[in-house]
Amino acid sequence: MDKLLVILRKPPYGTIDAAEAVRHAGGASGFDYTSILYLLDAGVFSAKKDQDSGKTGFTGIGESLELLADEMEIYVCQNSLMECGLNEEDLIEGVKIDDGSILGKALKEAQSVMIY
């Protein structure tokens, strides 16, 4: 089975990057890919509980991530989490924290890598 690694570095609102990253990772899971969604830098805010998109015009993606956590692996970078002032209790269910070892392994094993 082919592996897809989707790395999200952008915040969940302001651009379509976060929504596209989630859409591609989730869609690939439906086509017999093993998908990993890896949240890095401001991308970790996509896994924050109780997101409020306010008047941005963007739809929250936290609920979508919670649903996808049953179908694929979702990780947040431990360093990025700390840099953004978040901790494990701030995250939606099903998201795992990585110290970088999973990212390194996924980069070696993935047939395709998408970066947003």
Image (tube, grey):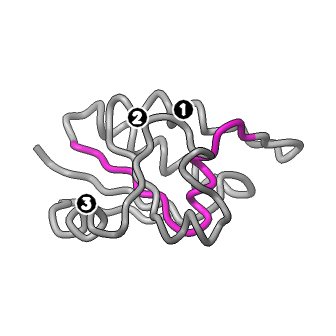
Q: In this view, does 88 lie to the left or right of 53?
A: left
What is the number of the mark on residue 64?
1
Q: Nearer the viewer, mark 1 or mark 3?
A: 1
47 vs 29: above or below: below
How many numbered dots are placed on residues in this image? 3
Q: Is mark 1 on a helix, strand or loop?
A: helix
Q: Which amino acid does label 3 sit on?
A: Ser
Disc 2 or disc 3, which is closer to the eye?
2
Q: Is residue 37 left or right of residue 107?
A: right
Residue with the mark numbered 3: 112
For residue 39, above or below residue 70: below
Q: How far apart are marks 2 and 1 (CA)?
A: 9 Å
Q: Which of the two discs, 1 and 3, labels the residue nearer the N terminus?
A: 1
Tell me residue 112's x, y (percent): 25, 60
Residue at image position (25%, 71%) is: 104
The tag on residue 69 is 2
Q: Give the range drawn in magenta.
A: 34-51
- Decide whether residue 36 is among the magenta residues: yes
Where disc 3 sits, the SS reads strand
Picture quadrant where residue 100 is located: bottom left
Number of residues whose C-alpha sits closer than 10 Å to that of mark 3, classed few (under 14), some (14–19) or many (20 or more): few
Q: Residue at x 32, y 38 (%)?
A: 72
**Mark 1–mark 3 distance (CA, rounded to whole Å):** 22 Å
